Amino acid sequence: MLGPFDYALIVLGLMAEVYVVVCLCASKKHFLYLSLNIYMLAAAGVTVAQVVVLQHFGVASPVYAYMYYYTDALLTISLFFVIMSFYQQVFRQMGVGRYVRWASFFLLSATALFSYLVVRQMPSHNLTSRFVVEMSQNLYFVGVVLTYLLWGAVVKLRETRTRLIQLVLALGIFFSADAACYALRNLFPGLEANFLKWVPPLAGTFLPLAWAYTFTKISEDARLETARVALPRIAAHQHS
Amino acid sequence: MIAALICVISVAVFLQFFVSYSRSIIAAYRKSDLSEQVREVVGIEGQNVSSDQFGQLVQLIRLCPQKGDDQTDLKVVGVYYWMMSALRSAARTLAPRVTSWAERERADCAYFVAVALDRRIAHSRDLLAQQMSNS
């Protein structure tokens, strides 16, 4: 059974998702953030669908579990397209967008194959549900790697667009929090009841909130030195 | 083994992203100069704010009417200040360079709150002026 805090997070996240969609549709930069907008719209739809399934079948039902993990995996995959669009923005002047697309598709396929091979070795009858959980964990980690590489490119290429910087950083926080949570679940299942169960909803609420904040407060023309933002070691490399 | 590796890397990357995200919020406020009034109220000399004044500034900001657009920033920077304080305490004997870096970050957090306080005071004054002109 969900408590008031769970519902508050769901409502807050849903409001932020809808806000970002409306905000982007109203702005002239709609096509620049098209994949982000589609992701936010999908996330809002999934949130509503999850609440409906939750009301009908309950949080402990297998229907809800299937629904949760499959939609989560699909949303994570659609988030990869958002990362790709950020890569294209960062590498726009270098004209390597085609290579970025191919690399991302290759990575996605390799993740699915790797997850399948791992699950196939397990003596479990429920191959499909194990596969989707395993793939979610791996997808989040691939997301961490891709976002970290993107952030490295932002720092190295001295990208100064504040909006892009904040969007990428928020995405990095979301992916790394979820990847760490999945890994901790595998390592210490006892932590799930008291601590880990809060991480995915908190991270899931943080991302639309942070993006809503960025689109509201940071204008497209705002600029920021990455040396001021990156950790000193990275910034030092940039200056050398 | 794979889970442990993913866990260590993810936590390290999470911390790095969180630090950078907090710094991106603070950097936007760093461009603003403090007004004479706030410097007088808080007892700040010049444009530098001492890191230890963070608590005092947070208490003062709670007394001001909310401006509405800085609540999230204040929460994020509050968590960042707490993290930097913990890092400073942990690294005090082992890594003096890390300690001095954490101290600079704490001072930046305090400066951020001072600018937010400045903006809230200006906002309160505007509200008061509006009320006076309406009555």
Image (cartoon, coloured by chain):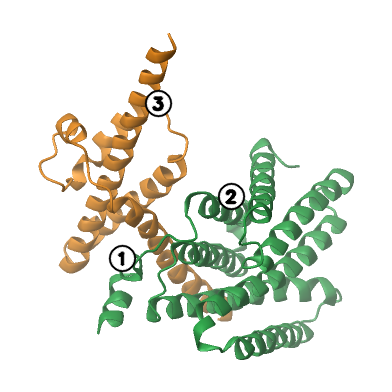
Q: Camera-side residue: B83 or A187?
A: B83
> Chain B in the picture: what colour?
orange
- Left or right of residue B87, residue A120 in this image: right
Going from N to C along the chain, the mark reached first, 1 or 2, is: 2
Q: Residue at x 43, y 33 (%)?
A: B67
Chain at numbered mark 1: A
Q: Nearer the viewer, mark 1 or mark 2?
A: 1
What residue is disc 1 on? Answer: A228
Q: Considering depth in this image, is A124 or A178 the residue closer to the camera?
A: A178
The residue positioned 60% from the left and 58% from the top of the image is: A190
Q: Is residue A98 above or below residue A78?
A: below
Q: How many neighbours does mark 3 have within 10 angstroms: few (below 14), some (14-19), or many (20 or more)? A: few
Q: Which residue is mark 3?
A: B65
Residue B11, given in percent of the width and then of the height, sits at: 47, 68
Q: The residue under label 1 is which amino acid type? A: Arg
In the picture of the structure, the residue carrying the numbered disc 2 is A194
